Image (cartoon, rainbow, N blue to C red):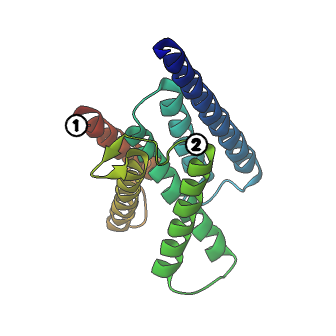
Amino acid sequence: MIKTKIQGKQRKKSKRNSRAYKTSMFLLTAILIVVAVIPSVMAHCPLCTAATIVGVGVTRSLGWDDSIVGIFVGAMIVSSALWMNNILKKRNIGGNAFLRIGSITIATFVLTILSFYYAGIFGPANTYRIFGMESIIFGSISGAVVSFVTFFVSNELKKKNNGNVLFNYQTMVLTFGSLILNALLFWMVF
């Protein structure tokens, strides 16, 4: 009887991992198609968004902890929100920039979390929590904060350098470097 329960749990976990992998690959494919169609010159590029989604897919397929996966999910959320904000700005949709970015980020976060919930990635049966919060949500919040901070740090570096970047792909390198440090910290602590 115990053996059948264990086998049932293993099948359920395998099914969940397979579903998450398929979802990640679908998102990656969709983003790559969008990257191919969108013009290549944007302040916050589709390449950044695609790269964060690849990070989510890789960590999930390797079976890493949900908090580490969440870091990259949070980065994907912020990257998508900044990308959408740039599209709205190019279409001359005005308003307060802070409120626009904030509302797009919250909407993207809610939609992402709802899709994870309905995909079965987390829920009431999940016992993996950090400070009473789902570990993937905790990681997402952490990744979002790190992404926003590095984005604004990169912009400040550009301003101090007369509008020029210090090196190619500056924002992307700073963001991914910070995300990897954040993931290493989570890996050591949690």
Q: Farthest residue toward the bottom?
A: 95
Q: Farthest residue toward the front?
A: 1
Q: Nearer the viewer, residue 64 or 53?
A: 64
Residue matched to label 1: 189
| Residue 143 coordinates in the image, percent (x, y) | 39, 51
Q: Residue at x 64, y 34 (%)?
A: 19
Give the Cα distance between marks 1 and 2: 26 Å
Answer with the quarter of the image where residue 120 lies: top right
Q: Nearer the viewer, residue 70 or 168?
A: 70
In the shown orientation, is residue 150 left or right of residue 111?
Answer: left
Tell me the amino acid under the disc marked 1.
Val
Q: Residue at x 56, y 70 (%)?
A: 104
| Residue 144 coordinates in the image, percent (x, y) | 41, 56
Q: Residue at x 22, y 37 (%)?
A: 189
| Residue 45 coordinates in the image, percent (x, y) | 58, 55
In the shown orientation, is residue 25 left or right of residue 160?
Answer: right
Q: Nearer the viewer, residue 30 or 160?
A: 30
Label 1, residues with CA under 10 Å away: few <14, some 14-19, many ≥20 = few
Nearer to us: label 1 or label 2:
2
Q: Is residue 95 above or below residue 49?
A: below
Label 2, residues with CA under 10 Å away: few <14, some 14-19, many ≥20 = some
Tell me the amino acid under the disc marked 2.
Gly
Residue matched to label 2: 120
